[in-house]
Image (cartoon, grey):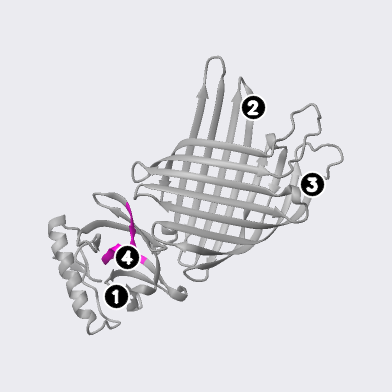
Amino acid sequence: LIVVPGGVPAEPMDANTAIDSVKASMAKIQLQAASGFGDMYVIQFGDTFDWLQLVSGEWIKGNIERMREDTLEFDSDKLDMLNLDFADVLLVHSPQVNTYVFDDRVSATGPAVITAEQVIVQTEEGTKTFPRDELESIVEGEKERDWWSMKLRFGLTLNRGNTNQLTYDINFNTRREDRLTLLDLNYNATFGKTDGVQNVNRQLGEFLFNVFLGSRWWVTPAFGQLFNDRFQNIKFRATPAVGAGVHIVDMPKVKWDFMTGIGYQYLNALAPAAGTKNPQNDAFIPLYMYWDFDITGDIDFTVSWLTNLVVTTIGNTNHTGKADLSVELTSIINLDLAFLYLRTEQPVQPADPALPAIEKNDYQLVVGISLELG
């Protein structure tokens, strides 16, 4: 075994040789733990890959993607992407450079090993040891690009014959997550025509910026929606807000979050009825719920509900409901089933009384393929 400075082997080994080397490395670490680790201690890793030992005794080779809320995302060499309950992981051998975040937002960056009781990180300032039960998250890498991910979904409905119809839906999400903050930007656009006449034209942009205060609480300096829907008679609606949130339920397979705050709503109708004030400026209270169910390692189901309770003009209160089922087909391609529900309590009616009245509710169901990177 040839080891380069820093205790990482110079090159990867075949799995059979590597697992014996990793076991020996972890046994040495556990023996050293009895007497403690000094700042100058160098971890001697057994392989260039990440390895996990589960409580069942099984060893898995691959790469750590991230860990948050007690769920470890691990890209297995043979089993593809796994979402593991961190309580089921006994040992971690990781020569890759990651950022480990602990209680009170303390962090350490470097290669590391995790035993049943400790997290030992080899940082540029020296080797540091932390209690395992204080570990909140693992963020892949140390560079800016390691903190970004994106997902692009495309869905299409096409009919030809007695009815010629084309409807397509595009959803783009980009996300930046480091040890202290989360930035999430989402854009959804749906356009459709029937016999050459447009009958769907909707765009919804969403933004969210969280600053974590600990394992359960966060503040949100900015979140909201930017919305346009020609057939809801909405030229532009903006709902910027500030608030705070909490994990109500934080289990490996089930998450339940709640967020609220205060916001400002700007509503500009496309063609309002006579006597309708336009544009309208209001204050609102956002009430947001989010649920995440990890059905299996390859199937994820999320539900969210947002009510913008407009306290100054109650009829402008609006709701956004989502339900998304995602099935992983490969490490980067998913099959998605997405449901979107939009409601306005008192829609702005059109200027032309001959036109149909604007309905309160809109529903959309999309089956699509998505590409996920990062």
Could you tell me which residue is drawn at 81 percent across and 30 percent down? 352
Q: Element at badge 2? A: strand
Q: Which residue is mark 3?
A: 279
Mark 2 or mark 4: name the one nearer the start of the chain: 4
Q: Amino acid at mark 3?
A: Pro
Q: Say whether residue 94 is magenta.
A: yes
Q: Residue 179: x percent and y percent?
A: 45, 66
Q: Which residue is mark 4?
A: 87
Q: Are marks 3 and 1 in contact (CB under 8 Å)?
A: no
- Of residue 79 and residue 150, the one placed in the foreground of this image is 79
Q: Amino acid at mark 2?
A: Gln
How many angstroms separate mark 3 from mark 4 (CA)? 53 Å
How many angstroms separate mark 3 from mark 1 (CA)? 59 Å
Mark 3 or mark 1: name the one nearer the start of the chain: 1
Q: Which residue is mark 2?
A: 198
Asked if residue 307 lies left or right of residue 272, the reply is left
Mark 3 or mark 4: name the one nearer the start of the chain: 4
Q: Which residue is mark 1?
A: 117
How many angstroms separate mark 1 from mark 2 (CA)? 62 Å
Mark 3 or mark 2: name the one nearer the start of the chain: 2
Q: Residues within 10 Å of mark 3 (few under 14, many from 20)?
A: some
- Of residue 330 and residue 110, the one placed in the foreground of this image is 330
Asked if 87 appears above or below 361 in the picture, the reply is below
